[in-house]
């Protein structure tokens, strides 16, 4: 029994040390490199490694060389069995304001070892609340939007592009 407990302790210690010393900054820059051929660039950011998490502050998101959003904070939690990406204080560029409210309070993206090819996301902002599920293997996803009063009154054209559910929410299904 004592040997089993000692083995479990060493295993836990090894896994914790592995996660702590993982080169998270290198993984971040590798991810940035993978997004570049798609026309997505994150620039002007400050990357800080906090041991078990990686924080990116004051980032600007460029899509096809056009500044699309300013992001105050990104927290990346890599735990192997459960990974999370918490993005907060996103302000979309003024060009999107005619289609979508510019302020997004936070976006939380989760991935679990129980379903490694499925990402689940939740977002809250001036648009209301959204829940998304993205299947990386089948390359499709769905979004369920509960619009705010602002979204219902000012962005009716955008809501017309979405399918209305029986509960009064809006859904969008896409392939990528």
Image (spheres, helix red, strand yellow):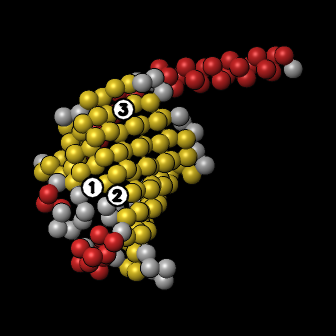
* Mark 2 residue element: strand
Answer with left or right where residue 159 lies relative to residue 14: left
Looking at the rendering, which quadrant does residue 12 occupy? top right
Residue 48 at what x, y percent from top left? 34, 26
Crowd around label 2: few <14 · some 14–19 · many ≥20 (10 Å): many
User: Farthest residue toward the bottom?
Assistant: 166
Q: CA distance from mark 2 to mark 1?
A: 6 Å
Q: Residue at x 17, y 54 (%)?
A: 93
Residue 3 at what x, y percent from top left? 82, 16
Looking at the rendering, which quadrant does residue 154 occupy? bottom left
For the residues carrying marks 1 and 3, which lies nearer the camera in this image?
A: 1
Up-down: is 154 above or below 126? below
Q: Earlier in the sequence, mark 2 or mark 3?
A: 3
Residue marked by disc 1? 103
Q: Earlier in the sequence, mark 2 or mark 1?
A: 1
Answer with left or right where residue 78 lies relative to residue 34: right
For the residues carrying marks 2 and 3, which lies nearer the camera in this image?
A: 2
Callout 2–callout 1 Cβ contact below 8 Å = yes
Residue marked by disc 3? 55
- Quadrant location of the C terminus in the rendered image: bottom left
Q: Residue at x 45, y 23 (%)?
A: 51
């Amino acid at each position: 029994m004592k040997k089993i407990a000692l083995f479990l302790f060493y295993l836990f210690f090894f896994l914790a040390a592995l996660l702590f010393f993982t080169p998270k900054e290198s993984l971040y820059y590798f991810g940035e490199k993978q997004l570049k051929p798609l026309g997505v660039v994150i620039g002007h950011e400050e990357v800080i490694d906090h041991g078990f998490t990686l924080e990116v502050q004051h980032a600007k998101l460029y899509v096809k060389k056009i500044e699309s959003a300013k992001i105050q904070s990104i927290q990346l939690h890599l735990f192997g069995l459960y990974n999370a990406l918490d993005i907060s204080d996103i302000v979309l560029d003024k060009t999107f304001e005619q289609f979508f409210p510019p302020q997004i309070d936070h976006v939380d993206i989760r991935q679990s070892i129980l379903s490694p090819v499925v990402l689940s996301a939740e977002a809250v902002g001036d648009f209301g609340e959204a829940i998304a599920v993205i299947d990386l293997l089948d390359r499709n996803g769905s979004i369920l939007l509960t619009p705010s009063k602002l979204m219902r009154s000012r962005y009716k054209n955008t809501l017309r592009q979405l399918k209305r559910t029986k509960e009064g929410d809006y859904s969008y299904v896409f392939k990528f």
